Amino acid sequence: MTNTESGHQSLWYDAESDTVKIIDQTRLPHELVIASLNSLQDVCIAIQSMQVRGAPLIGVTAAYGIYLALREDGSALESAIQSLAATRPTAVNLQWALQRCSDRLVSETVEQRPGAALELAQILEKEDIAVCEAIGEQGARVLQEIWQQKSATQSQLNILTHCNAGALATVDWGTALAVVYKGAAAGIPLHVWVDETRPRNQGASLTCWELGQRGISHTLVVDNAGGHLMQQGKVDLCLVGSDRTTRHGDVCNKVGTYLKALAAKDNDIPFYVALPISTIDFAIEDGHAEIPLEERDAEEVLTLTGKDESGSQQRIAIAPENTAVSNIGFDVTPSRLVTALITEKAVVPATAEGIAGLLD
């Protein structure tokens, strides 16, 4: 399973050049550009600018950033961790990966650290692929159960998703879209309603690109259409990812997720969250009070970037000059609105008891 027919993951280590290769997600869907990360600074910029994004992928990218930093200076472990930790505040996988790096490398000698850091980053890369595939397999069983209930009266299973929780948000497979891919491979006739996901339009640019690569039926809709589709009986389940989930089951995800969960609850539609266990922050209880919500640059809201009639990439302004902007990147969906969490180990209730069982 890879992002394109040419065989690319979202990220990989190129031993020949001793660099980290990524799909530059800011150039999709109009161009498939492979970028090289050669230094800690390159990695920090890639994360901040969202050349790489998605909680699991950010974590693995950061681990490779540690390697690139230590390759230049084996004593730079702590400063590299601090630089990477400051890039994105919300996604807990970043902190999780950096903690694993610290635990593994702090006792190594300065000379041994680069080799050990590279080995760990490659382990995290492989773990992420295996975990995401397992999430897909767990979730496909959920889709199969719902399809068995629906198949007598309709021709396809309709899923609504928000943002991009696909292979581009991870090293490969994805979280929410891994469920879609495994469900489609199992023969379930699927159709995906894709939220555009303003202001960066990850649904339009990335999710539609991924689904198109795999020939999965999908329709792009504006962010505010989800509730209407649910009222019309055109959504069978909602399926999203997560950037951080509390030990009590509150789910932090791309802003707009909460509104989908509210609409799903009002229309008796199941709302599932697919995530690796590494995205669960067992240190916090209250998502509203304890999760830092990133506020991003106003330009993301004030402008749009796309391809014009000549095929050139252009940025245009869509609001009056000097318009005040609030650009909160995430919101928190309380656990009471979540039907279940789909993890690599099991599908569990979004409760303290259900989540605690994942640690056994």
Image (tube, rainbow, N blue to C red):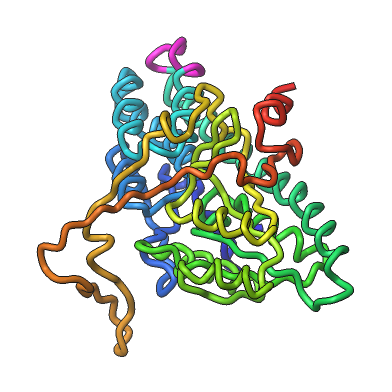
Q: Nearer the viewer, residue 85 or 195?
A: 195
Residue at (36% x, 62% y) in the render? 200
Q: Is residue 139 visible?
A: yes
Residue at (30% x, 84% y) in the render? 308
Residue 110 in percent (x, y) is at: 37, 15
Q: Is residue 15 visible?
A: no
| Direction from residue 217 to residue 92 in the image, left or right | left
Q: Main secondary structure of the magenta part?
A: loop
State the extent of the magenta-drawn residues as a range. 103-111
155 lies above or below 251: below
Residue 105 in percent (x, y) is at: 46, 18
Count numbered badges in the picture: 0
Residue at (78% x, 53% y) in the render? 142
Q: Nearer the viewer, residue 290 or 182?
A: 290
313 lies above or below 96: below
Q: Does the stretch in magenta take in 201?
A: no
In the rendered image, the quadrant that contains the C terminus is top right
Q: Nearer the viewer, residue 240 or 312?
A: 240
